[in-house]
Image: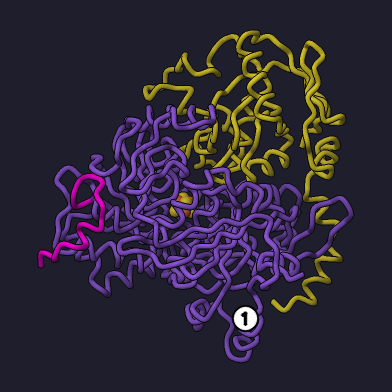
Amino acid sequence: MGKTLFEKVWDAHVVAQDPGAPAVLYIDAHLIHEVTSPQAFALLRERGLKVRRPDRTFATMDHAIPTRDLDIALWPQDAARQVETLRRNCRDFGITLFDIQGDVQGIVHVVGPEMGITQPGMTIVCGDSHTSTHGAFGALAFGIGTSEVAHVLATQCLLQRKPKTFAINVEGELGFGVTAKDIILAIIARNGAAGGVGYVFEYRGSAIRSLSMANRMTICNMSIEGGARAGLIAPDEKTFQWLQGRPYAPQGPDWERAVAYWRTLHSDPDAVFDREMTLDAGELEPMVTYGTNPGQGIPISGRIPYPEELEDPGERRSLLAALEYMGLKPGQKMEGQRVDIVFLGSCTNSRIEDLREAAKIVRGRKVADHVQALVVPGSKAVKRQAEEEGLDRIFVEAGFEWRGAGCSMCLAMNEDKAPAGKYVASTSNRNFRGRQGPGARSLLMSPIMAAAAAVEGRVVDVRELMREPLAV
Amino acid sequence: MEPFRTLRARAVPLRAENVDTDQIIPAQYLTAVTREGMGQGLFSGWRYHPDGTPNPDFVLNQPQYAGAEILIAGRNFGTGSSREHAVWALLQYGFRAVIAPSFADIFFNNALKNGLLPVRLPEEAVQMLWDLVEEEPDTPIRIDLERQIVTLPDGQELGFPIDPFRKMCLLQGMDDLGYLLSKEPEIAAYEARSPW
Ligand code: SF4
C-alpha cells in the first residue's frame, strides 16, 4: 500500500519508537518568538541544559511588539521586557534572531517561508498554533506548548503520537471574487471547529494546485481553526520556484538534490486516508463569520442559522451565546452589517499578494467616514515590496493607516486593539470573544472582502465592487 | 511535575462548548516572562466586569463552587492558541482535572505535560455531571487515574480513556524531558544519517 504525504514526512523523522510509547520525532526547524519561549529557556537554565541545535533554531519578534513604533524606549514595559529577554536568550544560547532593529522582521509564519527556512519534507514546530501555515510547502508543521519548546530546544525532538490523516479535496475553479480564505472558511463551516481534532489535513485537488504559494499558506494557516494541528499541500514546481534563491534554501548541487527528493513528496495514488471530504470550489461564495468560533461562518448570500435548525444542544448553546456577544440575530444576513474597524493583516493574510488584491479594491476609493482601517504587513520585506509598488500610497490616500510588521490586532496584546462592542472586519484567523480587544466583535473574511467593507462601512459582497468601473 | 493518582473533589459546571484558550487566559496575561501570576487571569474576561469588579453571574464566582478542583466543560475545550499559560492558569487557580467530551490537541498535550488531568467522558455523562453538580454543588467526585474511572457518590462509575504512556508519566510525575534526554544516542545516530 502506498503512503500519504504525511506518512512519508513522519516516517523520515522517527528517531526512536519504544513499544507503547509515543514516537521520538526529530525536528528540522524550530521557530521561536518572544511570548511562548521565556519559560522554556528558564527551564533549560534550571536544568543546566544547552540548546542542542542552535543552527536549526530561529527567533522572531512579532506577538507583543507595537506596530506603530519600533523604538523600544517608547514601548510598554512588559513588551520591552519580553523582547529584551528573547535577545538575551538568543545571545546566550547562540540562536539566530531576526531582531526588530534588523532588515528581516515580522510574523514568524511570514518570515520563515520568506527566508527559505521552511522547506518541503521538513518537520517544523513553533510555540504557536498557526505553525500549520508552513504545511503549504509540504512540511509537517505544527504548534506546540512551552514545555515542548523546552524539549525541542534541549533535544531537537518531541514525543508524539502519530495523528490520523484527512484528505480534503477541493476540485474545480474558484469563481470571481472568491479566494483561498473563502475555501478554508467554508471547510471549517462545514466540518466545525473541532472537525479535524486528531487529524492532519492534506489539501488536494485542482483548486488547491492552482493556488499561489501565498494562498496555499492562507489555507494551511487555518487548519488549526478546523481542529487539525497540521495541514499539508504536496510541493510542486510552484513551491520549488518560490523557494529558489531564498537565503536558507539549498544552493547549487544541494538544490538539485533537494528538488529531486521533494518531487517524491506526494501521496501515492493508492495511499489510504482515514477520512476524506470533497468540496466543489465552483460553488463557493465569499464567506463571513458571524459567531465566536471560526466554524460559525456563512456565505455572503446566506443568513445566520436559527437555533431551531440545529439539532445538537451544544451547537444551539454555542450559537445563542455567540449571537448575544456579537449583537446579531438568528436569520439575519451578514450583508449590510455595520463595520467599525478594518484590520488587514495577520499570518493568514498579510503577504504581498493579499495587499495587492486588497489595494485593487481600495484604489480610487475612500474608507467610510466612521471606519478606522489599518494595514499591518506581515513582514518588513512585505512592507518594502508594497512600498516599491506604491500600494502604501493607495491605502494611505484611501484613509488606511500603514503600520510596521507584527501580529498587531490579530491578538491584541498591545495597544493595537479594538474597543468593546465594535465590529471588526478582519483578515485574521480567530473570531474568539475578545480576541481583538475585550468586548470586540470580529468578522473574519478575505482581504478583498475586508477592503470592500472598509470603503462601504458595512459588510458587502465584494463582487459588486469588482464589477463597478474604478473611479480613477 | 506533581504526580497525579487520585483526586476527590468538588466540581464546577461550565456549560460552554469550544472554550478557547483566549477565554481561559486572555492575551494581556501573556506578557509575563515567568509562569507565575496566571491564576488571577483565569477566565478574566468572564470573571470580571470591564471595571474590574467580579461578575457574580459567572459560575466560578458563585460561592457554592469555591474551592472546587474539577472543571466540567463542553466539547472541544482548550481550542485555539497553543498558549500553555492556559494550563498554568487553571492549575494556579486550583484545578487539578478538567472533564469534557473532547479537548483540542495542543491543550490536551499541554495539560498532560503539567499534571492537569484531562478526562474525556461521553457527552451524556458530561450532561449528567452538569445537572448533578448544579443541583448538589457539594457532590464530591472521585477520579482514579490508575483505574481510569470517575466515581460518583452513588457509586456509579464512568470509565475514561488515556494513553498508557501518558498515564504512566502522570502517575509518576515524570515529564518528557528526561525520557527524551535518555534517547541521546539515537538522536545523535539520526543526525549522523540525516541528509539535512
Ligand atoms: S498573526 Fe495572529 S495568529 Fe498569526 S502568529 Fe501572530 S498572533 Fe498568531
Q: Which chain is purple?
A: A
Quarter containing the C terminus of chain A: bottom left
The segment highlighted magenta reads A454-472
Q: Position of residue A52 (x, y in %)?
A: 72, 64
Q: Residue B49 or A263: which is nearer the viewer?
A: A263
Under circle 1, the secondary element is loop
Tell me if residue A43 can be seen.
yes
Q: Is mark 1 within 8 Å of ligand 1?
A: no
Vertical arrangement, residue B177 with respect to residue B112, above or below = below
Taking the spot 81% from the left edge, 56% from the top edge, the residue there is B181
Q: Position of residue A430 (x, y in %)?
A: 44, 45
Taking the spot 25% from the left edge, 64% from the top edge, the residue there is A359
Which residue does the numbered mark 1 point to in the structure image?
A: A263
Magenta stretch: residue A406 in it?
no
Vertical arrangement, residue A217 with respect to residue A372, above or below = below
Q: Residue B177 or A80: which is nearer the viewer?
A: B177
The outermost residue toward the right is A19
Q: Position of residue B154 (x, y in %)?
A: 79, 11
Q: Is B175 displayed left or right of A392 in the figure?
A: right
Taking the spot 20% from the left edge, 58% from the top edge, the residue there is A465
